[in-house]
Each structure stands twice: as C-alpha cells, then as structure tokens.
Amino acid sequence: MIQAVNVTLRLGKKALFEDVNIKFTEGNCYGLIGANGAGKSTFLKILSGQLEPTNGEVVITPGQRLSVLEQDHFKYDEFPVLDTVIMGNARLYEIMKEKEAIYAKEDFSDEDGIRASELEAEFAEMDGWEAESDAASLLNGLGIETEYHYSLMKDLNGSQKVKVLLAKALFGNPDILLLDEPTNHLDLDAIAWLEDFLIDFENTVIVVSHDRYFLNKVCTQIADIDYGKIQLYAGNYDFWYESSQLLIKQMKEANKKKEEKIKELQEFISRFSANASKSKQATSRKRALEKIQLDEIRPSSRKYPYIDFRPDREIGNEVLTVEGISKTINGEKVLNNISFIMGHNDKIAFVGGNELAKTTLFQILMGELEPDEGTYKWGVTTSQAYFPKDSTKEFDNDLTIADWLMGYSPVKDITYVRGFLGRMLFAGEDGVKKVRVLSGGEKVRCLLSKMMISGANCLVLDEPTNHLDMESITALNNGLIKFPGVALFSCRDHQFVQTTANRIMEILPDGTLIDKITTYDEYLASDAMARKRTIYTANKEDDEN
C-alpha cells in the first residue's frame, strides 16, 4: 500500500496539488490521468520520493519495495544489459556484487567466510539463483533477444534501452510499481506482452499513459487529476469517461430542478409576502429557499482541440497506384517490391515494427525520396497533406505561429488563419509565439492546423499521436473517423487504429507487404498475423533519432 496524506505541492504561488489524500492498494492497477500540465509525472515523483511535497507526506507499508520506470536512457551505459535489469532489486544486486568481491579475494579469511555465508542465505531467500533467468525472461518478453543480454547498454539503440529500463522496473516482483508512459517507443508486440504482464501482476501498479486501449486493458481504477485534486473511479478508462460525464449530467439536472424550485418559491414569496393570511406560508418558503444550495459544477481543466479536415473537392475513383517500389537505406532493403491500389474509401493503417520502412514509403509517396525501383501515381482529383515523423525543418525559423500558418493558407487573411489556430487551442497572444520554441505537442497541433487549412482530400500521417495528450489524440481520432477523404497513416495507439482504419498493411522485416481489408483487431487475431508478426530486432531504426 502507498498513500498520499494531505499532500500539497506549491510551485511559486501556484498550488499544483492541494491537500491530496489518496490510497493505492494491493491488487489494483491505477491509471493516473489528467490534462497536460495537471501534474501526473510530478505526482509520481512525489510518490517515489524523488520530489518532496510542500506539505503532507507519502506513507508506504513498512518492508515493501517500490520500483520506478526510469527516464534517463544513458544512466547505465557502462553496465551490461542483464546487470541493469537485476539492479531493479537494489539489495539483491548489492549482495551479488559483494559476493563476487569476497570470492575474488586471494587471501580469503574466516571473517570473509562468515560474511559470504550470511550473504548466501539472504541471496537464497530472495530467489537470487533465479535472478538471471528471471531477468532474461523479462528481456525476451519485451523483444530483447538473448544475444544482447551481455552487451553493454551503450551498444543498444534508443528503443532497446527503453525496453531494458522497463524490464528493470518490472524485475523482482516489486510491491509497488510506478510507470510513467511505459508504452512510449514500444512496438506492438512489446505492448501486448506488457499488458499481459500487468494483468497478471498481483501487487500495486500506478501508471501514466496516453494510450486509451492500454488503460482500458490493464486498469482496475482510474485516478483523475483535475484542479489540484485527485478523484478515484472504479473501472477502466472508458468507465471513468462515462462515469465522469454521467456525474456532470446528474449534477446539471439536479441544479435545474433546484433552480425551478427556487423560481417557484420566489414567485410565491413575491406574490403573498404582503398578504396577512399567507404570511406564515411565505415565511416558511423563505426559510426553505435559504436552504437550497446549487451544486458547484467546476468545468474540467481538460481542453479538447477541434479537428475537422474538410476537403476542398470530392475525390475520384482513381486515388493512388503503387507498383513495385523498392528502396535500400544504409545497405538494408526496407521496401521490397511494394505494390497496392488505394480505393476512394480507404483509410489504411501501416502497422508493425518496421518503422523505417513506413517512414520511407511515406517520404517516397510525398516526393521527398526517390525509389530505387518502381513507380507511384496519385489520381488527378487528389490533393495531399503530409504529417512527417520528423518535423524539425518545418520549425527551424523565427516566424510566429500566425505567420507560419499564413504561409500555408490559401486565404491570406489573419482572422481566417487565427480561426484555425483557435480550434487547436492557440488563443490570443499564443499566435505571436515563435514556432522555434514550441513544445512537441504544440508543434503537432501546428502541423494539424496546416493540414486542416490545406483542404486536402488525401492525408498522409506518420505517427501523428506522438507528443499529444489524450484529449488531442481523441480529437484527432474523431476528426479522422469523420474525414470524408482517404488516409494513409502509421500510429501506435491501438484504439486510434482500430476505430479509424478499414484496411491494414504491414511491411515485414524483409521489406515485403501484407495487405488486408479488415479491422485492426481482426488482423491481430488472424492466423496469418500470428505467423508473420515480428518484434523489433537490434538493427531496426532507433525511433528516438
């Protein structure tokens, strides 16, 4: 059990948390949710002891071990992978190293023998003899193959390091597990493995994630941060959403009835207060009126952008034809004879672990790269808008947000442009902010504004949900669902893919293509998918770079 007791955290004059009291108990997985800036990661740091609250305290059941998913991908660069995972249980790792040092002594004394015996007893009690096999099992489950277990951490790429740090957090059956965005940079197989692990995990888990499907799959309760308070809801993310909306609806309906009663009492008092025969009744109603209190309905701090892609023209039957495209990058054939014809109703999701192949194909289709072999042709009625995975060049200038978007607007009117920015939560003075200094999420919202203002009927999006909060992901998801044009996209958000795509394509490690007209869940469940799905290997793209 871990508990926050009267926790307050002030940053200057602002209170991020105010008198928070919440208990997290064994056997539950809590999804910690809230708007960007609500303090999700900060609250995890308070629970883990990395950050001291201004007031209050965190109480942990004596003797229980707490484990945290670390974010510093370079901290363990000089350590072997397997050792890094075992460090998840600090005491066990200390025992192992002290034992090694004692047994390495040339002048082994009686005192050393006694100490070694004590360490061996504690080591056995902690199941130390299973440590390496348990660590290896976690690594294999997350897609780090055995050949890398004895490599140094510095020899792994970014996505592999993320998996090792996750294995470190999971190692040794911790009593309390704190996970901040554990699915970031994980391939779909690793996410599925983690879901199964957490479902079977019997201790306490508190997880922050923007992945709605993941939260629905693993969470037994939702802890919602809003206006510096945390409220618990039983059930998963969808149940929280329905419950919170129902609660607001019930409060509004209750207030409406109270307002009707107030009006009725006021009318009676106004009509009969001067009437001697009705004065007692009027006085009674005054007392009743004073007792009626309307419920305070504070609007949520969450803000949802309005994403609405409206094509300037209807798309024809001929959309996109791809014939025999091949491409080799740094000696690796990432696209191998790729061919498909896109229909005028298609929304195609590119899934699977071959990130470089998906990005390369999108760059070719948008004219940024030339294929080694093959051709592609867009239909004459089509117009394209592109969301690149790496948008660094887009924002390498000193323009303001408004001027930057004006450069892409077909209507050179600042009011028109600011209308699009307003939909994406850039209000007032935000328009004069320089694009160079924008956060990752703000840059994504700028790019989506650019796509909306283009009026394109074909959208190409390469990992658009990266850096977005849950509210923006939901808005983009809904915007693509109702978009009347066609789309090609890659995305790690399971719910996003399942609810948007009517066609699934996977580029396999050998560069060939699986193409199925089906939903994502049906694709995952198919026998062909079970045989052909693959996990990341060491030579796959470092998706952090």
Image (cartoon, helix red, strand yellow):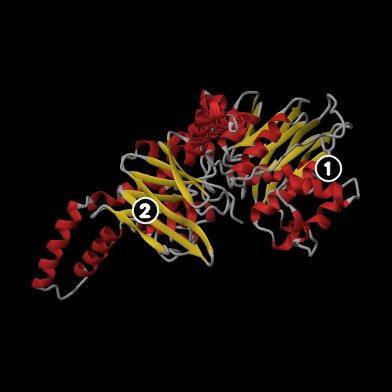
Point out residue 107 in the picture as x, y percentages from the top left corner. 15, 76
Point out residue 515 in the picture as x, y percentages from the top left corner. 65, 28
| Residue type (three-letter) at the residue carrying disc 2 | Ala
The tag on residue 408 is: none
514 versus 128 height, above or below: above
Residue 392 in the figure: left or right of residue 130: right
Mark found first going from the N terminus, 1 or 2: 2
Q: Residue placed farthest to the left in the image?
A: 110
Residue carrying label 1 = 454
Does the image show residue 148?
no
Q: Nearer the viewer, residue 233 or 98?
A: 233
Task: Check whether the beta carbons of the residues at disc 1 and disc 2 lie within 8 A of each other.
Answer: no
Residue carrying label 2 = 4
Q: Secondary structure at mark 1?
A: helix
Q: Residue at x 76, y 28 (%)?
A: 341
Tell me how far mark 1 sits from mark 2, CA to CA.
49 Å
Q: Nearer the viewer, residue 255 or 45?
A: 255
Q: Quadrant of residue 76?
A: bottom left
